[in-house]
Amino acid sequence: MLSGRLGMSLLLAATALGQSFEVTSIRASGAKSIRGSEGGPGSKDPIRYTFGRANLLDLLVVAFDVEDFQVLSKLALDRDEFDLMVKIPANTTQDEFHLMLRNLLVERFQMKFHTETREFPAFEMVQAKGGAKLGTEAASRLASDVDSPQLDTEKPGLISWNSMSRGHLVTRIRGQRQPVSRLAEILRTAGPRPVVDRTGLTGKYDFAMEFSTELANGAADSAAPSGLPDLNTALREQLGLRLVAKKLPFAVVVIESFDRRPTEN
């Protein structure tokens, strides 16, 4: 079984004819270009998607719905930046949107690629001894007590924010009616390895956690701010989970060749 978000449908057919945007504009970024993306299926503007100052790695991560480590290339993918704007047919699904973006990269950049499976150092997130605390009264109370921006109580949501304190990076995470897999995704940004959910938990939960990470250039004798635990201790004590280091198989996209400049709009 392949870890990560790259599914079997991608491995069977990375591109397909007849899947394209209604309007496409992609051009080299200029001095006034602003980095950032917005719109697309599932957003407030589902029929329009823009990505400013995007390099090819950015676009590939979106197009294949993967993490950046799952895109491999001997050629630099971050050398050039582009401003992308596409108009999307009404009622397009997320999967169809990703397919359209893959087709665009093939068409406009003459991109050639293949998919394969490779092993990477990773973490499996599993239940700690004594079982998960998610769904318990204590976990729900912590989700309400953590000093953080509030989520809309009427809607599911997840928020993560960082701050600096005494040579440490302090991370606070709050989830509202979220699956554990979303926590695994957000923890990917908190460490050097991808995190894969192996807890077996299938519900949606309210949860919160807070932990600190000592920075490489932090003072050697600096204590953790306000006594906050490290990530593994926080997972175990606050959520009843733990991380197990392993090598796991991930589907990857291997870029064979591409043109640095897209064909004309």
Image (tube, helix red, strand yellow):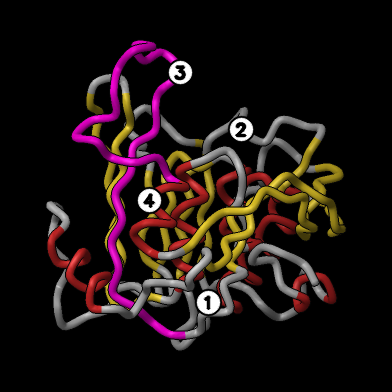
- Determine whether the residue tagged by mark 2 lies in a helix, strand or loop: loop
- Determine whether the residue tagged by mark 4 lies in a helix, strand or loop: helix
Determine if the magenta segment contains residue 241.
Answer: no
Disc 3 crowd, CA 10 A, few/some/many (<14, 14-19, 20+): few
Q: Is residue 225 left or right of residue 19?
A: left
Q: Which residue is mark 4?
A: 234
For the residues labelled 1 and 3, the Cα–Cα distance comes to 39 Å
Residue 257: horizontal and vertical position, in percent?
Answer: 84, 42
Q: Which residue is mark 3?
A: 216
Residue 8 versus residue 173 in the image, above or below: below
The answer to which of marks 4 and 3 sits earlier in the sequence is: 3
Determine if the magenta segment contains residue 228.
Answer: yes
Residue type highlighted by circle 4: Ala
Residue 115: horizontal and vertical position, in percent?
Answer: 84, 59
Residue sitting at 82 percent across and 75 percent down?
A: 13
Q: Quadrant of the N terminus?
A: bottom right
Q: Nearer the viewer, mark 2 or mark 3?
A: 3
Residue 152 versus residue 116 in the image, above or below: below
Q: In this view of the protein, which residue sits in the foreground, 76 or 145?
A: 145
Q: Nearer the viewer, mark 1 or mark 4?
A: 4
Disc 1 crowd, CA 10 A, few/some/many (<14, 14-19, 20+): some
For the residues labelled 2 and 3, the Cα–Cα distance comes to 26 Å
Q: Which residue is mark 1?
A: 94
Residue type highlighted by circle 1: Gln
Label 2–label 3 contact, CB within 8 A: no
The answer to which of marks 2 and 3 sits earlier in the sequence is: 2
Span highlighted in magenta in the image = 203-231
Disc 4 crowd, CA 10 A, few/some/many (<14, 14-19, 20+): some
